[in-house]
């Protein structure tokens, strides 16, 4: 079952294509990375999912139904550019935002108190937002995003401005929500976070989807058959036809396989070089990201032509 | 709809609770009252006592006693030697008198305008002093001439009585019409109040939207509520704040006018010394003021205040939606300032129309200005003291609220796009494109 299905989403601002035939599915319970360089059209997509703006064409399904106004009460969105009313007090501000998500007054008060206890911020309850540090305000913002217990959470750069301890707190909360079966869309530039947290990603560039799939599969897909070998002994030049040595440094060799990995190991054994460790080097998402973006940028003309055919 | 109420509530409560609101609400009427009391008190200690020497070379006024002004602002002294006075006058410090009135030797009582009486002074004689001196001399000359014609004082008083026509309505529903002067004054106060409230609270809406935009809370809010709900909530919420303040002002001033002022021992007869209360621009007598004061007390305020509230709110919704659109379109203060002008202009123009409309409350200008939605919030309530026909009021209400719906639809389009637009200078062309955009 998909929490969200986007099919052939198009959105233009004048002649600028913010979203061009974008389709992808987000399964229920997944942590889904929405990635792309600056200005790729991520925010446009998110705003269409949250019904702030509307696509020119294409369909968005929410839990199998056409996205409607009521669904927005089941979505929690924490935008990248986020703020709060500076002169309001923490407690009343959270109540206000909860009420705007259609919670009753008593329900809102229960939930706000629950989260305030959970994040141990009871002492700030009556503090004005302007008295809070940036990290504190972020926590309040996070509570506001999850206060109505949404099925779908959209977090745009949720860790920016957080110290490691608070970042960990939010990260744990994200896993916790996943445990409860919530779907999370996670938008960021920080690839190491994506690698750590996300199950699946979609990569957007210039309004086009250029890549999508599971993080593990993508790594397999983009791997270049490289291995890192730690060894004792001397690795002579001009050896095997089975592999190329890309670099050696402090008894570690990075090699590019031409055939099976066993052939590489065999060479080391035959030459009496002790292998201490042998690892496949998978590309980081960062590398995949850069490679994919560069490929589409140079090949953009071709995809355009293919589209019109 | 429920969400709009939640937004209205927040906008209202956070503003009403602010210290600034409480302070201005309490202090403005106090300040107004203080001003009135201050003027009363100051009137007793008129600082500009002018000593005026009268030199009668003609001898016509030999037996005449010139009365001093009742507030002591002008005091007459009879002198004989002009040369001495003129010699003194050369030395400014030695000037004994503020002014010297010289009646020429060849002055003709029978032809008082043939030769002028001169008033010599190095100091500026205020309007009040001049008016008093002119009146005194006119009166005295008239008395002297009357005496010459063997008319005694009683007969003269009888002759020179001024009369006031009593203006009354012909039909039953016009009977309650206030005196024109009271109507103009009252209408002017109403129009002025709406004008000021529109400007103050209109810009408050604009700043509120700009704050939300620069705070980036807009992004958080629009995922929960529709922009148009946000806009309406803000306009209505702030409008309610304005109305609250206005009603409190009315109440406080009411209490002030009819309780505190009499308690201070200031009776309405003191009013004649109050400056700048020339409703008709003419001279006033105490009776007339007392009459106005009394008729204000008896005046039917309820319908006027009711209409005032309807039009203030309607006008506020109309202009508020435009101010909200501008707040959303403009990124910062300087940006908005250039965008504000087209919205301020109709308010200011309506205010200038107010004078003409009140001068001819049943004229065409007043009629049209009271119907056009942009000027009706200021003009229509101001015309209320003249009992305009009911159809005019109702039509005006319909137009105003209809105009609001149209403006709000237009504004919502600008608002929706504007609130999420950052870092770009907004031009009118750009705004036009937003209005005609499909989504």
Image: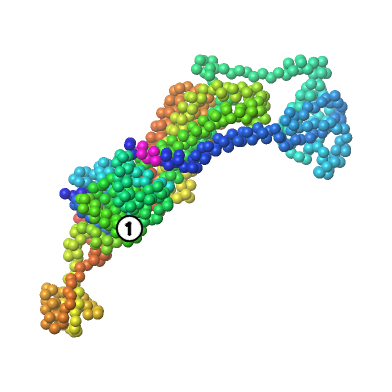
Q: What residue sits 45% from the left and 22% below the top?
A: B390
Q: Is residue A225 in view from this perspective?
A: yes
From the viewer's perspective, is A226 left or right of B23?
left
Q: Is residue B144 above or below residue B342?
A: above
Q: What residue sits 83% from the left and 42% below the top?
A: B94
Q: Based on the picture, tell me whether residue B438 belongs to the magenta stretch.
A: no
Query: Which percent across, then down, holds residue B269?
Result: 65, 25
From the viewer's perspective, is B108 left or right of A135?
right
Per the image, the residue denoted by label 1 is A166
Q: Is residue A274 above or below residue A53?
A: below
Q: What residue sits 80% from the left and 27% below the top?
A: B66
Name the colouring of the figure.
Answer: rainbow
Q: Is residue A233 above or below residue A96?
A: below
Query: Which percent across, then down, holds residue B373?
Result: 45, 32
Q: Based on the picture, tell me whether residue B8 belongs to the magenta stretch.
A: yes
Q: What residue sits 13% from the left and 77% below the top?
A: A265
Q: Nearer the viewer, residue B207 or A29?
A: A29
Task: Give the residues in magenta.
Answer: B4-10
């Amino acid at each position: 079952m998909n929490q969200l299905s986007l099919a052939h989403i198009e959105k233009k601002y004048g002649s600028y294509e913010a979203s061009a035939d974008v389709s992808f599915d987000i399964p229920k319970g997944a942590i889904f990375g929405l990635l792309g360089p600056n200005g790729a059209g991520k925010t446009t997509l998110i705003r269409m999912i949250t019904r702030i703006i509307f696509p020119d064409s294409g369909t968005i399904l929410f839990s199998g139904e056409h996205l409607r106004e009521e669904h927005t009460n089941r979505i929690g969105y924490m935008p990248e550019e986020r703020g709060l009313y500076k002169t309001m007090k923490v407690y009343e501000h959270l109540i206000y935002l909860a009420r705007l998500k259609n919670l009753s007054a008593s329900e809102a008060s229960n939930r706000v108190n629950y989260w305030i206890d959970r994040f141990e911020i009871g002492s700030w309850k009556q503090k004005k937002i302007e008295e809070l540090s940036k990290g504190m305000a972020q926590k309040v913002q996070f509570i506001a995003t999850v206060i109505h217990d949404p099925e779908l959470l959209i977090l745009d750069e949720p860790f920016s401005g957080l110290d490691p301890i608070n970042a960990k707190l939010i990260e744990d909360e994200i896993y916790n929500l996943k445990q409860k079966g919530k779907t999370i869309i996670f938008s960021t530039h920080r690839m190491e976070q994506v690698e750590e947290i996300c199950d699946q990603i979609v990569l957007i560039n210039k309004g086009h989807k250029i890549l999508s799939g599971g993080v593990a599969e993508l790594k397999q897909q983009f791997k270049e058959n490289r291995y890192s070998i730690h060894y004792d002994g001397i690795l002579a030049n001009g050896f095997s036809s089975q592999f190329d040595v890309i670099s050696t440094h402090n008894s570690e060799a990075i090699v590019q396989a031409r055939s099976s990995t066993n052939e590489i190991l065999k060479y080391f054994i035959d030459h009496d070089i002790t292998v201490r460790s042998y690892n496949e080097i998978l590309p980081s998402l960062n590398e995949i990201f850069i490679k994919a973006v560069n490929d589409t940028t140079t090949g953009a003309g071709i995809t355009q032509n293919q589209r019109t055919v | 709809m429920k969400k709009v109420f939640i937004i209205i509530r927040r906008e209202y409560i956070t503003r009403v609770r602010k210290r600034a609101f409480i302070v201005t609400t309490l202090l403005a009427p106090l300040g107004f009252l203080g001003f009135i009391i201050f003027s009363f008190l100051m009137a007793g200690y008129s600082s500009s006592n002018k000593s005026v020497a009268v030199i009668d070379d003609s001898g016509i006024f030999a037996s005449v006693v010139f009365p001093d002004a009742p507030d002591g602002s002008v005091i007459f002294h009879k002198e004989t030697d002009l040369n001495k006075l003129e010699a003194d006058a050369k030395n400014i410090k030695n000037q004994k008198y503020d002014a010297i009135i010289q009646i020429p030797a060849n002055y003709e009582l029978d032809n008082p305008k043939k030769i002028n009486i001169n008033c010599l002074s190095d100091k500026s004689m205020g309007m009040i002093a001049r008016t008093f001196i002119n009146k005194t001399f006119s009166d005295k000359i008239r008395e002297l001439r009357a005496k010459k014609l063997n008319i005694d004082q009683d007969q003269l008083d009888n002759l020179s009585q001024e009369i006031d026509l009593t203006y009354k309505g012909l039909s039953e529903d016009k009977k309650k019409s206030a005196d024109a002067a009271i109507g103009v004054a009252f209408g002017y106060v109403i129009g002025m109040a709406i004008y000021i409230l529109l400007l103050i609270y209109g810009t408050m809406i604009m700043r509120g939207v700009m704050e939300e935009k620069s705070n980036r809370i807009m992004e958080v809010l629009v995922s929960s509520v529709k922009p148009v709900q946000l806009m309406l909530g803000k306009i209505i919420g702030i409008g309610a704040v304005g109305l609250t303040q206005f009603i409190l002002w009315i109440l406080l001033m009411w209490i002030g006018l009819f309780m505190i002022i009499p308690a201070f021992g200031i009776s309405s007869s003191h009013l004649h010394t109050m400056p700048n209360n020339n409703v008709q621009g003419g001279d006033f007598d105490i009776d007339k003021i007392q009459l106005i004061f009394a008729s204000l007390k008896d005046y039917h305020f309820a319908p006027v205040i009711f209409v005032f509230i309807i039009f203030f709110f309607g006008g506020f919704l109309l202009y508020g939606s435009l101010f909200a659109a501008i707040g959303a379109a403009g990124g910062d203060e300087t940006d908005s300032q250039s965008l504000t002008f087209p919205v301020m202009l109709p308010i200011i123009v309506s205010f200038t129309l107010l004078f003409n409309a009140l001068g001819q409350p049943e004229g065409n200008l007043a009629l049209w200005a009271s119907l056009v939605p942009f000027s009706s919030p200021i003009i229509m309530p101001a015309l209320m003291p003249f009992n305009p026909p009911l159809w005019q009021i109702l039509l005006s209400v319909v137009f105003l609220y209809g105009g609001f719906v149209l403006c709000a639809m237009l504004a919502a389009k600008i608002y929706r796009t504007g609130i999420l637009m950052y870092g770009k200078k907004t031009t009118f062309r750009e705004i036009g494109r937003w209005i005609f955009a499909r989504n």
